Image (cartoon, helix red, strand yellow):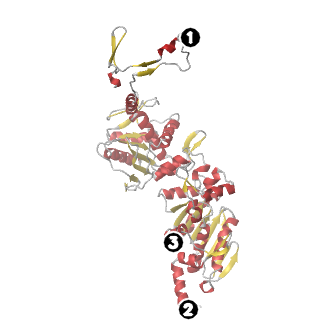
Amino acid sequence: MASAESMKAEIIRCGKDPHYFINTYVRIQHPVRGLIPFRTFDYQDEMIKDYLNNRFNVILKARQLGISEVTASYAAWLMLFHRNKNILVMATKAETAKNIIKKVKMALKKLPEWLQLANITTDNRLSVELDNGSQIKAIASSDDAGRSEALSLLIIDEAAFVKNLEELWTGLLPTVTAGGNIIMLSTPNGVGNLFHKVYTDAEAGQNEFKQNKLMWWVHPERIEGLEDDPDRPGFKTSPWYRAEIKKTNMSAREVAQELECNFNASGETFLSPEEIDYVAEGCIAPAAKEHWDKNLWIWWQPQKNKRYFITADVARGDGKDNSACSVWDTDSMEQCAEYYGKIPVEEYARLLCDLGHRYNTALLVVENNNIGMACLEHIRLAAYENVYYSSRGNETAGEAVHSAWGPATGDRVIGFTQSQKLRPLVFSKLEEFIRNRIIKVRSKRFVVEARTFIWENGKPQAMKGWNDDLMSAASQGCWIRDTFIMPGEAAANIDKLLLDNMRVFGHVNTEIKGASKDPVLSPTAQMGVFTSNNPMPNKIRLPGNRVVDFSWLR
């Protein structure tokens, strides 16, 4: 039997290190092997660290990864080694929430007697209380769920499926304002719900949540024979994966939801899941965050002799929309900088002018809607010298003009005019650039918008409650670059390629396959094969003494 001193040292160690406590003393129910010691995998160890080091955690996960077991074991540790901890578990249904309570009780009751530092005073299917004042309670989602609680930890299980979570969220947040923590975990359930918003905002660095994505292959028992899927770039397959799909007879949508953590599989997103994945894979952290609000992200500083242009979407600065602009390398179509935030119109105009001067007097393209025209008026007063003009009443590609600063005339108007008729074409150009891997987006904030930008009633637009400001600015960039900035250069390149690939042959076969060899029946057969050993002359004299020079074909 261990001495009192060794037990005391062990208790202290367990209280300081939940990872050690869980791996040494917690037991879990395995569906095949029964009650077994909990030996966490590497990805589960990372979850424990995240729970300790971050107040707010959001986990996008494939199914059957043991995240509920890790979360319940962490909750048991928190209750046992801390006084007066109040933990609330919320789920879609009471039965789902009760599963975590059951796992917490299992962890507490199967500890060695000397490690049971607090006695269970309340023990039922929906709650457990200890005599040190700590408790855990499970509830199903309802209109007033958790509003009266002051919580140490809020666990929302399968958060993407909790009904009315958007409405409940306003009442739940104050319950943790005194220092409590939140753990949201779920498989995906389409786009636009609160779980999707919290996760994507965390991914873009727009909230305080630490985000984590756990794909099916993080489990070490599933990776034997793991390889890239030859039919789907960016995806993986293995014997386990193929057997699981066959065994459960899952549809493609269910596979994307249950195993591949794909938000987009169930939505009518404007961009395909593959196109969104391409954009997401190109995102990198900005090299610098500037401006007073740190919302100006810089990836690449301007380089001498390079050409740039800036596309801008304008908001009032006090509404739900943000003003957004992107700086593009004209030749590579790579995003160099981006602003995204709420800013007064006059200040936004100054920011655009400053960015334009910074990036080699870049062409400035600003949408001239109502608030956009106010921004353009400030740009006009600042006398910025390289501004885009649209042809008045003409939406034909390539008809827009810009010039050194001067007043608008009867046939042109300052800024980019985007009518309802033109809008689908402009956004389709963005899709074309992404599909053909022409544009190189670097911003995670753009990906957040792309995942909630949908077709609705035949029109491209943001889902209700979401924004499309960066999507709008990028689509303008693709349209302007393809129809105005580059069409002349593109045509010249096409002509050059055409001429470079033309050849002069001195061996011409004029024989018609299958024609009779009898010159009476088939006079054309007499033509046979014409061969010339002489090079083709540079000039040929045509009837009427007209001479044509063909030397340009060389």
Q: Position of residue 93 (x, y in %)?
A: 69, 63
The residue type indicated by label 2 comes to Ser
The vertical placement of 70 against 550, above or below, is below
| Badge number at residue 52 | 3
Q: Position of residue 336 (x, y in %)?
A: 38, 48
Which residue is the extreme one toward the front?
A: 518
Q: CA distance from mark 2 to mark 3?
A: 30 Å
| Badge number at residue 3 | 2
Residue depicted at 67% across the width and 53% down the height: 250
For label 1, the residue is 521
| Badge number at residue 454 | none
Relative depth, front residue between 190 and 317:
190
Q: Quadrant of residue 392?
A: top left
Q: Quadrant of residue 304?
A: top left
Which residue is the extreme one toward the left?
A: 304
For the residues bearing labels 1 and 2, Cβ distance under 8 angstroms? no
Dot 2: within a 10 Å radius of its alpha carbon, few (fewer than 14), some, or many (20 or more) residues?
few
First along the sequence among labels 1 and 2: 2
Q: Callout 2: helix, strand or loop?
A: loop
